[in-house]
């Protein structure tokens, strides 16, 4: 029985996501940061919609970027997506099978990958500039996100710009989609329609979605799984139907709130004694210690 279960897990993870024994540190030598992830393990089965929750700074964005192949972590066996190495097997991203939607376009007209763009582009120019797209899928997304193709990208609102970003990210039918808080600028109708679209994609095509967010409205019935991380440690990873607290709580928000509040109480640490701080010179190089006239340059 145990062997069958193991085989099933391996088959599942081969088409989904499997992280095994992952170590990751930002290697900030000056600050001597400890590793964020030490022996981190995670499995996400194909077809699931996994909600990634945790406090600010717990490691959600870093994890999603690692899964998206943006950081090289360990050998080829450590971070596996669709049975390939997320970092080394570049065709995962090039083919569109692995898609990552994160970061904000609000300060830029748009982005090409991680490169910010400035200029006068129309939404049409950006969306129709992507080659090899199924026109039916493109039309569906334009309608779903209520995009006006005549929008000039430097003259639209943050939410309208975000819709174009999301549209571009979804044009190719991904197999694994990593979402980092991209629905934050969307109005409630667009957000709910988009979540419904993701649900359909998971159910019809067995796509896998991992979604990091702090907004839990309507997600109790949307998510199939939940992963909770605290300071780089996976505290919970289970089916949403197995989360016992949800049976006695009004909603997911109150469950996550109780976890994060308990975390703050448990983990509150005393400030580390900083010798330079004690000598009163820790802020001398900071731009924020300058006179208010100089501060104007940093605002
Ligand atoms: N570029 C970086 N260099 C050094 N440390 C970083 C860098 N980016 C993030 N960190 C550190 O890694 C930790 C995890 O950050 P991360 O952005 O993954 O958290 P998060 O869970 O996504 O937070 P949030 O909910 O605020 O978006 C933080 O404590 C942060 O200090």
Image (tube, rainbow, N blue to C red):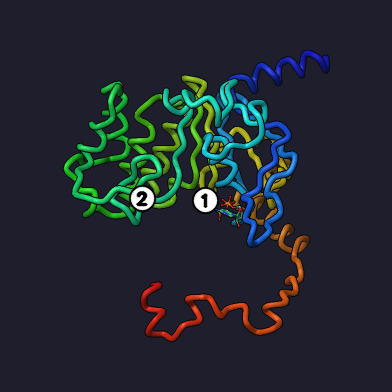
The residue mark sitting in front, 1 or 2, is 2
Q: Which quarter of the rendering shows the N terminus?
A: top right
Q: Which quarter of the rendering shows the C terminus?
A: bottom left
Name the residue nearer the viewer: 111 or 180. Answer: 111
Residue that numbered label 1 is attached to? 215
Residue that numbered label 2 is attached to? 105
Question: Distance from label 1 to label 2 (Cα)?
Answer: 19 Å
Residue farthest toward the left in the current orientation of the protein: 150
For the question of whether residue 105 can be seen, the reply is yes
Q: Is residue 265 above or below residue 47?
A: below
For the question of whether residue 251 can be seen, the reply is no
**To which quarter of the image does residue 96 belong?**
top left
Residue in the picture at 50% in, 44% down: 180
Residue in the picture at 67% in, 79% down: 277
Instruction: Answer left or right for 82 relative to 269.
Output: left
Which element is circle 1 on?
A: loop
Instruction: Answer left or right for 193 relative to 265.
Output: left
**To which quarter of the image does residue 227 belong?**
top right
Query: Where does the image place residue 268, in percent across and percent down from the top left?
Result: 74, 65
Name the residue nearer the viewer: 155 or 197. Answer: 155
Q: Is residue 193 above or below residue 255?
A: above
Residue in the picture at 64% in, 39% down: 226
Residue in the picture at 72% in, 77% down: 275
Which element is circle 2 on?
A: loop
Q: Mark 1: give few (<14), some (14-19) or many (20+) Cα within 10 Å.
A: few
């Amino acid at each position: 029985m145990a062997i069958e279960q193991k085989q099933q897990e391996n088959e599942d993870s081969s088409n989904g996501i499997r992280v095994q024994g992952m170590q990751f540190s930002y290697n900030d030598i000056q600050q001597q940061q400890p590793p964020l992830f030490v022996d981190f393990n995670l499995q996400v089965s194909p077809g699931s919609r996994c909600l990634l929750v945790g406090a600010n700074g717990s490691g959600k964005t870093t994890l999603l970027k690692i899964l998206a192949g943006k950081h090289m972590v360990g050998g080829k066996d450590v971070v596996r997506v669709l049975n390939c190495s997320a970092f080394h097997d570049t065709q995962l991203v090039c083919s569109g099978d692995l898609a990552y939607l994160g970061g904000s376009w609000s300060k830029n007209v748009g982005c090409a990958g991680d490169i910010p763009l400035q200029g006068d582009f129309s939404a049409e120019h950006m969306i129709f500039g992507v080659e090899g797209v199924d026109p039916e899928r493109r039309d569906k997304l334009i309608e779903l996100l209520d995009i006006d193709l005549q929008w000039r990208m430097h003259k639209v609102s943050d939410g309208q710009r975000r819709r174009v970003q999301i549209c571009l990210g979804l044009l190719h039918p991904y197999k694994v989609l990593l979402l980092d808080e991209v629905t934050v600028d969307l109005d409630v109708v667009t957000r709910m329609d988009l979540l419904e679209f993701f649900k359909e994609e998971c159910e019809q095509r067995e796509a896998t979605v991992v979604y990091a967010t702090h907004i839990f409205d309507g997600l109790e019935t949307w998510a199939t799984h939940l992963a909770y991380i605290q300071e780089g440690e996976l505290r919970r990873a289970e089916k949403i139907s197995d989360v016992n607290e949800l049976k006695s709580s009004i909603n997911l928000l109150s469950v996550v709130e109780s976890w994060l509040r308990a975390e703050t109480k448990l983990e509150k640490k005393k400030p580390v004694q900083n010798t330079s701080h004690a000598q009163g010179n820790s802020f001398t190089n900071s731009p924020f210690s300058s006179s208010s006239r100089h501060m104007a340059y940093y605002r």
